[in-house]
Image: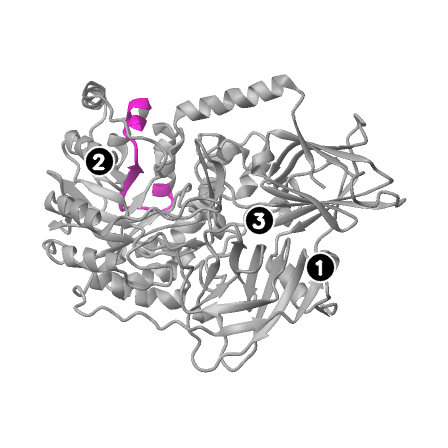
């Protein structure tokens, strides 16, 4: 049965939506791949310079340990050059930090840069965690480990980080406030940020360089060109950070000159401006010239993009060709620039933490589980050809590249051996109804989004799936009006009758039940299973509600259905613990019972090694190994194999795989010793 999709009848609403879409289009949502670079006229740039010169303030000068004058960094009064690499602690398990730091140091780097993901540390409002999730939350340990290897640290605590990370690092519970405006001077937002800084900064303030630690600089906010952020907002964040103990240098990061034109030119009074780009001929040279034209500031390429990321249903990563990389990097090094490679070490969007993008022509696109980024060090931390090229160049420019302690390593640590553990059959499964029996059950008059469920001390549901259930009498048609985000499966008496994704968001969905299903039951079960595929990490941020924002009608009635039962399937630890030991696991039947939770076990001999789990033959879902959420898979690609860190595997003990499959399950899983071949 094929559902009919009918455009929304309310013309005013449709016109409004189209009007907003046009505004967003011409406002220029950054896409980096789909936008053609248009340089800003020189007369416009000169106007910005004049505004800065004629302003009331003086250009920013650091009060911290890292200072600058005459376009040169100084540390402890001596010339200093930053060769840094981005490496996110929350994307790489702690067992791999030492190896990565050694390879970074062997490449000629003296600094590591990392974001801090606010939503990872305060998933539930007011409850902070800096140690859990197999160590992925231990930002302090990460910094101390970098220090032990003689690396300086640049910290980017946000509160907004982008990073292709869920909601740009912002906690989704912010949206429970109906007046919320994130990245603004709205009091509710600033208050939440202040609480976040009050917990984070004391946790790591003793690791600042002035106090004997490796942290030499902090970023205020991030990428102003991707959203409207005023200078007063930056001043407020800077004041908060100082209040809670930040004493080192402040810097900003923005990939677009137009942000300065649009009123952000006083940034130059507040922090060191830095630039982001990939190619000099696609806006990079304009940014370089602009910073040099300001006069006092050293050129710091805060994000020199070494590749790009993948999206579901999108293109493969846009790689930086080796000859081009060598050419651009040589020019930057010859100019005396300091550089941070983004990314230097790839990683993984474990669990539900992948973000999403919205592009001009291609709409919403969720990011895949892998964050390999085609970086010099891969998702598994392996050195690549790109690594060798960068190392060869950096070694020629080591003057003033001092280390926290020690010197550049002469030997590069070897890449770890990967294992192909083979094929393992699926043994048992847990039905969807049994899975729901362990979920919290919420009775609600109206359909609610994830964020507005009464859960976790007022924090709502952040991630995963949400099921809306309604028992109906004999029914002929169902109409769903409104927006659902991001993907919905419709079930009638346990049978899937339709599936929709974000491309139907501007439509009214009409389902005719007369076609090929039994409607004669006195009581019929309607299930609407909606998946949050990742909140966007650029914009529009204030509209990132997940679930259904609308109403459901039957048989032409103008009165919406009420009195729903809602199941939040967020796969949090308490829910998982009860599901893992459920007594109703059964042998696989002759038919496919999906959606369901599938189970398999496997043993390995010797020290566990990294491996890659193939999900070819499966359709869409999430995978857990030994209770650790590896992330999402989807047959649409481009990713078909999930990276499995050896550190989550067990030797001489059964390893358990649990797979929540939403559509059609495979019969087995296969472990390879290499990632998805492109």
Q: What residue sits 49% from the left and 56% below the top?
A: 129
- Labelled disc at residue 463: 3
Q: Is residue 236 magenta?
A: no
List the residue tagged with mark 2.
Answer: 281
* Residue 141 lies in quadrant: bottom left
Q: Is residue 250 magenta?
A: yes
C-beta proximity under 8 Å, tags 3 and 1: no
x and y percent of residue 429 in the render?
A: 68, 66
Residue range of the region highlighted in magenta in the rendering: 241-262
User: Of callouts 1 and 2, which one flags the residue occurring earlier in the amino acid sequence?
Assistant: 2
The secondary structure type at the circle numbered 3 is loop
The secondary structure type at the circle numbered 1 is loop
Asked whether residue 65 is in view, the answer is no
Specify whether 535 is left or right of 260.
right
User: Of callouts 2 and 3, which one flags the residue occurring earlier in the amino acid sequence?
Assistant: 2
| Quadrant showing the N terminus | top right
Query: In the rendered view, would you say 59 is above or below 303?
Result: above
* Residue 376 lies in quadrant: bottom left
State which mark lies toward you, 2 or 3. Answer: 2
Q: What residue sits 19% from the left and 30% below the top?
A: 290
x and y percent of residue 127 in the render?
A: 54, 52
List the residue tagged with mark 1.
Answer: 593
Binning the other alpha carbons within 10 Å of mark 1 as few (below 14), some (14 to 19) or many (20 upward) gives: many
Binning the other alpha carbons within 10 Å of mark 3 as few (below 14), some (14 to 19) or many (20 upward) gives: many
Front residue of 4 and 308: 4
The secondary structure type at the circle numbered 2 is helix
């Amino acid at each position: 049965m094929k559902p009919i999709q009918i455009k929304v009848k309310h013309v005013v609403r449709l016109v409004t939506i189209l009007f907003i879409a046009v505004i967003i289009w011409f406002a220029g949502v950054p896409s980096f791949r789909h936008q053609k670079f248009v340089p800003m006229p020189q007369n416009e740039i000169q106007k910005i310079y004049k505004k800065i010169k004629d302003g009331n303030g003086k250009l920013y000068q650091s009060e911290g340990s890292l200072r600058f004058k005459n376009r040169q960094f100084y540390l402890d009064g001596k010339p200093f050059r930053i060769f840094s690499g981005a490496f996110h602690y929350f994307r790489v398990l702690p067992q791999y930090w030492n190896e990565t730091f050694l390879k970074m140091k062997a490449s000629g780097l003296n600094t590591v840069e990392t974001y801090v993901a606010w939503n990872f540390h305060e998933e539930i409002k007011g409850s902070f965690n800096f140690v859990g999730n197999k160590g992925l939350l231990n930002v302090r340990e990460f910094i101390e480990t970098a220090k032990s290897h003689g690396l300086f640290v640049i910290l980017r605590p946000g509160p907004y980080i982008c990073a292709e990370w869920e909601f740009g690092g912002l906690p989704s519970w912010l949206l429970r406030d109906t007046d919320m405006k994130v990245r603004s001077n709205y009091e509710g937002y600033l208050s939440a940020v202040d609480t976040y800084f009050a917990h984070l900064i004391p946790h790591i303030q003793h690791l600042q360089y002035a106090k004997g630690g490796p942290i030499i600089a902090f970023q205020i906010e991030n990428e102003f060109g991707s959203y409207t952020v005023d200078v007063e907002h930056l001043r407020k964040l800077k004041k908060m950070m100082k209040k809670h103990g930040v004493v080192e240098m402040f810097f900003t990061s923005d990939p677009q000159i137009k942000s300065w034109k649009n009123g952000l030119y006083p940034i130059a009074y507040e922090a060191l401006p830095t630039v982001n780009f990939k190619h000099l001929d696609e806006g990079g040279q304009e940014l370089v010239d602009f910073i040099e034209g300001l006069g006092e500031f050293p050129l710091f390429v805060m994000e020199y993009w070494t590749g790009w990321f993948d999206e579901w249903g999108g293109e493969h990563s846009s790689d930086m060709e080796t000859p081009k990389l060598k050419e651009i990097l040589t020019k930057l090094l010859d100019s005396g620039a300091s550089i941070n490679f983004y990314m230097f070490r790839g990683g993984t969007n474990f669990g539900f933490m992948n973000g999403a993008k919205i592009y001009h022509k291609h709409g919403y696109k969720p990011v895949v589980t892998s964050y390999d980024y085609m970086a010099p060090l891969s998702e598994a931390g392996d050195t690549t050809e790109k690594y060798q090229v960068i190392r060869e160049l950096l070694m020629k420019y080591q003057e003033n590249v001092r280390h926290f302690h020690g010197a550049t390593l002469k030997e590069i640590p070897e890449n770890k051996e990967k294992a192909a553990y083979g094929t393992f059959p699926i043994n048992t499964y847990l039905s969807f109804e049994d899975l729901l029996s362990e979920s919290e059950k919420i009775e609600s008059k109206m359909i609610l989004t994830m964020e507005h469920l009464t859960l976790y001390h007022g924090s709502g549901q952040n991630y995963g799936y949400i099921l809306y259930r309604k028992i109906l009498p004999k029914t002929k048609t169902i109409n769903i009006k409104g927006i659902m985000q991001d993907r919905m499966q419709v079930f009638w008496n346990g049978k899937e009758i339709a599936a929709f994704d974000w491309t139907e968001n501007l439509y009214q969905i009409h389902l005719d039940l007369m076609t090929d299903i039994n409607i004669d039951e006195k009581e019929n079960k309607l299930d609407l299973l909606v998946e949050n595929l990742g909140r966007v990490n650029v914009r529009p941020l204030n509209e990132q509600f997940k679930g259904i924002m609308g109403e459901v009608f039957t048989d032409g009635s103008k009165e919406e259905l009420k009195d729903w039962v809602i199941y939040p399937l967020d796969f949090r630890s308490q829910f998982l613990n009860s599901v893992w030991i459920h007594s109703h696991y059964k042998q696989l039947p002759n038919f496919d019972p999906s959606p369901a939770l599938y189970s398999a076990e496997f043993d390995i001999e010797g020290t566990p090694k990294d491996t890659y789990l193939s999900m070819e033959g499966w359709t869409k879902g999430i995978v857990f190994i030994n209770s650790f959420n590896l992330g999402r898979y989807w047959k649409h690609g481009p990713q078909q194999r999930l990276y499995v860190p050896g550190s989550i595997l067990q030797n001489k003990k059964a390893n358990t795989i649990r797979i929540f499959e939403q559509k059609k399950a495979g019969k087995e899983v296969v472990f390879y010793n290499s990632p998805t071949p492109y």
